[in-house]
């Protein structure tokens, strides 16, 4: 997996902080987190059964609790971090 640049990480952290994403871990209460490298894409499936390859997805970043490993996903579009041509209206 390609690592995120430090500039990208700082933009993501700033966007999360501006939106108040500063609460402790909901599982263990720790306040120490790591922004994981890279990006995740959650595919949007038209049905519960089966898997469709391709189609719409939700690009996101993941933050991990340093104590218990709880993973938190944040949608890049909501954070205003997607290029304009990728934002669906």
Image (spheres, helix red, strand yellow):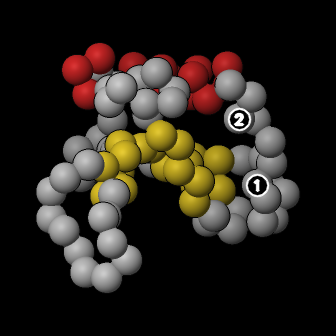
Q: Nearer the viewer, residue 80 or 22?
A: 80
Q: Residues within 10 Å of mark 2 (few under 14, many from 20)?
A: few
Left or right: 58 in relation to 22 = left
Q: Is residue 23 above or below residue 65?
A: above
Q: Residue at x 53, y 50 (%)?
A: 73
List the single residue furthest toward the bottom: 49
Left or right: 21 in relation to 49 = right
Residue 3 visible? The answer is yes
Quadrant in the picture for the C terminus: top left
Between the C-alphas of marks 2 and 1, the distance is 11 Å
Disc number placed over residue 25 in the picture, else none: 1
- Badge 1 element: loop
Q: Which residue is mark 2?
A: 21
Image coordinates for residue 21, horizontal then vertical, percent: 71, 35
Q: Residue at x 29, y 20 (%)?
A: 83
Count every numbered label the image shows and give the total.
2
Residue 66 visible? The answer is no
Which quadrant would residue 64 be assigned to in this image?
A: bottom right
């Amino acid at each position: 997996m390609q690592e995120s640049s430090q500039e990208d990480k700082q933009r993501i952290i700033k966007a999360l902080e501006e939106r108040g994403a500063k609460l402790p871990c909901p599982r263990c209460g720790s306040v120490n987190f790591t922004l994981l490298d890279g990006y995740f894409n959650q595919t949007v499936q038209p049905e519960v059964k089966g898997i469709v390859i391709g189609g719409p997805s939700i690009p996101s970043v993941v933050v991990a609790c340093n104590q218990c490993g709880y993973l938190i996903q944040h949608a890049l579009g909501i954070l205003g971090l997607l290029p304009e041509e990728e934002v669906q209206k």
